[in-house]
Image (cartoon, coloured by chain):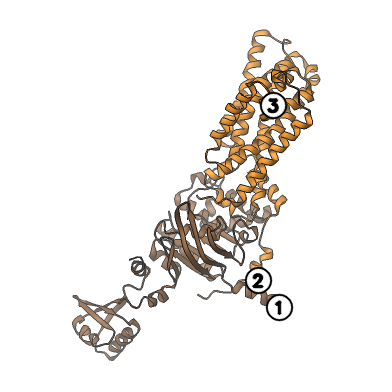
Chain colours: A orange, B brown
Amino acid sequence: MTTSRPSSTTWSPELAPRRGFFDGIAVTIRVAGLSLLRGRRGVVLALLCALPLIWPALELFHSGLGTKGGVGFVQLLTELWFPRINLIVALFVGCGALGEEIDGKTVPYLLTRPVPRSALLIGRWLVAAVTASVLLGAGYLALYVATVAPMGGDALLVDLPILGYALLGMALSMLAYCAVFMLFAVTIKWPLLVGLVLLFVWEEFAATMPGNLARYTLLHHVYTLLAHGSGDEAYHLLARPEEIELLPAAESLQVLAGVTAGSLALALAKFRRKSYLV
Amino acid sequence: MSGAATETDAAVAEPAVVLERVSHWYGAVIGLNDVSLRFERGVTGLLGPNGAGKSTLMRLMTGQMAPSQGDVRVFGQLPFANPAVLGRLGHSPEHEQLWDHLDGAAHLFALLHYGGFPAADARERAARSLARVGLASAGSKKCGAYSKGMRQRLRIAQAIAHDPELIVLDEPLNGLDPVGRREIIDLVRGLGTGGHTVVVSGHVLHEVEKMTRRIALVHKGRVLAEGTIDEIRRALDQRPHHVRVATDDPRGLARLLLEEPGVLSVRVAAAEARFEVTDPGSFFDRLARITADGHMVVREYESTDDNLQAIFDYLVA
């Protein structure tokens, strides 16, 4: 078949659009944005984050102003947020960051664009970690105000470091958890199910077992960092179950960083060579 | 300059896609079996029933999968997860899924921007591409509210929006109404004559035939035939061609033509005669002479199996 000759500018390979690694990460973040919180999932996760506010509201209703302070905030963090809400948010956002494109069969649109797969994965991981952190951070802030403000305006400033460390610990844990769940999403068929088992079977089980088994959970290292940072007794108790020795902060930081980097490396190795059939 | 131009010309003249002895397995199931094909500029139809291996072939050439065996080259490079190749191709998948939370224009913008175009350029191209597929007025509508036909048009729009050299369209007429089919057929033909390499799959044979005369027939993971419809038909000359001739005197025509060497048989009906011939070229020459000499009035004639359906039936059978 004869065809007309196209203009050379259109067909020059050098002019074909493409993204490099860092550019690809940046554009992935821009395009994916806060899309992870859209729809029903966003509403459910936002409600989940708002749920603990009921507790200080009831407390306030019964006891009046000036009865509770930063201790209530940390109690709620250690009893509800870190071991429950953080994990659920990380699970759904981390698995969904790429998983929803795979399950939703829209992944071919992304895989046929001139963007390195590694940039796509890293970009989506960052979007997931930041999205989860922003959502949880808003919840922390609301909880902080709800629990500390009744003690008076000064308390809000005095207890600010407690909030700061909590946010920092949460953000670090989101980087690690989201990396683990992205690994699940690109390697196994039922990432949510396996994630639930990891979070609510393994982490719960290991934390309650005697000895050093708790150190094989991510949450233990998050508590260790918070114990070192904020010095709060509640974190110390959680970081030293069975009175085991408190790990140095650097060691826990290395564990979190190692799990994050290792999960991402494995996810990248898989994602780079995987074919998605839709 | 001239040297560079010559190099560019040489690069353009090479087939955009070359598959050499490619096989692909899905576990124990074979999707493609020892396929060798070349796709050059213009439109090529990839024909075969569902499950024949067309989509597998398209996934391989669009870099979504690597072959289990053999070599796939697009623009001389391995396409699998290769951004240097992916920037030069566009792919419209068979499935209907879109980002339903986005409107049509935002969908195209996201893909263009993601694929390397600056925001302003991406916006302009998105609008232009929507207009090309007849969705200009639906650009602000959420994809979730699109009809099947609109979804198909948008999938085609995202495949051509960046003006790629290679365009791979998997069943692009699915879900379209007759008017839509006509428009997309015209669009595909236009892309082919505009210098793009277009690979288009389908199983509605007469529609593919309207887009191109160059085809590859795929069945059970194998390529049964490739080339123009005429070439393939000629390659099958061991089988007789069927020719229908409408005339007022079919018996008289049958008498005249049965004497010809390549005519095997004839069936006569009220106002037509159906011939089985081994050399259609000579047969049509003789028919033209008879008509020109005024021996017979021939109202129309056609080779009833010089179409894709007949060729496909031959090969698959």
Mark 3: which amino acid?
His
Marks 3 and 1: which is nearer the front?
A: 3
What chain is tagged by disc 2?
Answer: A
B205 to the left or right of A239 = left
Mark 3 neighbour class, 10 Å CA radius: few under 14, some 14 to 19, many 20 or more = many
Q: Secondary structure at mark 1?
A: helix
Q: Which residue is mark 1?
A: B3
Q: Which callout, 2 or 3, points to the residue nearer the camera? A: 3
Residue denoted by label 2 = A8
Q: In the image, is residue A221 above or below residue B130?
A: above
Q: Are marks 2 and 3 on the same chain?
A: yes
Residue position for label 3 = A220
Can you name the residue that lies furthest to the front here? Answer: A211
Q: Position of residue B195 (x, y in %)?
A: 56, 70
- From this viewpoint, which residue is outermost toward the bottom? B293
Residue A124 image point, x, y percent: 64, 43
